[in-house]
Amino acid sequence: METVLNAFSACFVLLLIMAVGYFMGYKGWMGPPEKLFLSKYIMSIAVPCLCIRGLVTNLDRASLVEAAPMLLSVFLGIMVNLLAAAAVLPLLKLPRKQKGVFLAMCFLSNTLFIGLPVCQQLFGDVCVPYVMIYYLVNTTLLQLLGVTLIAFFGQGDGHKPTALGFLKSFFTKPPVLAVLAAIVMVLTDVALPATADRFMGYLANSVSPMALIYCGYVVYEIGLKNLRLMRGLPTMLVIRLMIAPAICLLFCHAFHIEGLARGVFTVEAALPVVSQTPVMAGAYGADDRYAAIGATLSTIGCVVTIPILMLVLG
């Protein structure tokens, strides 16, 4: 019971911070320009600082070598999740523009905007290296498969993704570049200077509240009155919030991943829909409203499912 209460308390705190973003939107203090600023600041400045500081501080060369089975475990878990979603897709009889969105929502999770604050609340800052491992795999599959699926089933004027486009998109993401730079620093035993460590620490501490305020504003943009369980969304919620962590747990057991790593990976697998899905849906002619409602419902749903998951994890 204490575990459930602690997890619920952590999730409730996150929900309260999201409510700040909703309130700011309601009062007119935050609009599309502020939303764009938050997104750019978080993804281009604060998260890269968090990646470098978190990895360099919490990893060494030996532990980095040991991360290879973890990467494989995360990859296989996400791919099996995609196969499960693809298996039920024909039964749902969704419109074409919703099919790719449904698949992307099922197998990709919100590893940074929601995942990082959740894991820091539940496990502390020591979880950052494992969050980055999951993020690296998740964002690779987002660019490689998520965009492809949404574009394939979309019917808009968006350009179809290419291999060159994937490489350019992937290797120009500041968080990805930061992770790669941190890995090089760990392998070469390069430590952060004290001034750089303090500077990055201040910016890294702003990630969680800023990301949650951003998510709260997105909920305001959609509007609570517009939230309804459209066809396929109940199935997506079951896969995203329940089946995905179960699959992750199985692969952690198969690869003998225990302790903190197992807990972080399982929570990351049980997170809401990745926040870029509605944006990608709009860009490639898919149903962006369907994606936005799914992302919001899954965000609200994880407040209930994560405390239960923490009880299962013990």
Image (tube, grey):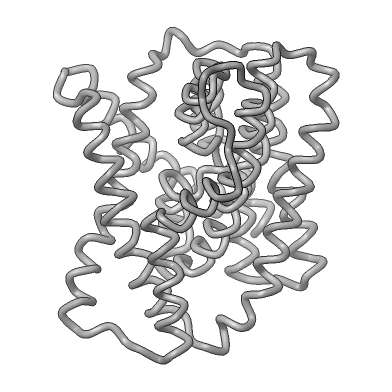
Q: Residue at x 38, y 71 (%)?
A: 54
Q: Return the residue nearer the eye: 204 or 173.
A: 173
Up the image or down, 50 lies above or below 278; here it is below
Image spot of residue 88 (x, y percent): 83, 27
Viewer-closest of 312 and 276? 276
On the picture, is 71 further left or further right than 133? right
Which residue occupies 38% across, 66% down?
178
Quarter of the image where the C terminus is located: bottom right
In which quarter of the view is residue 19 placed? top left
Instruction: Examine the rendered structure and indicate whether residue 307 appears above or below residue 291.
Output: below
257 relative position to 158: left or right: right
State the residue lying farthest toward the top: 225
Instruction: Tell me residue 132's x, y (percent).
Output: 49, 63
Residue at 63% from the left image edge and 11% from the top image edge = 230
In percent of width and height, residue 293 lies at: 51, 19
Q: Residue 287, how many percent across, how many down?
A: 56, 16
Q: Image check: 259 left or right of 204?
A: right
User: Which image quadrant is residue 210 in?
Assistant: top left
- Tell me what residue is drawn at x 56 percent, y 83 percent: 63
**With respect to residue 152, does 54 lie above or below?**
below
Left or right placement of residue 227 versus residue 152 in this view: left
Q: Is residue 60 above or below residue 294?
A: below
Judge by depth and name the residue closer to the eye, 35 or 280: 280
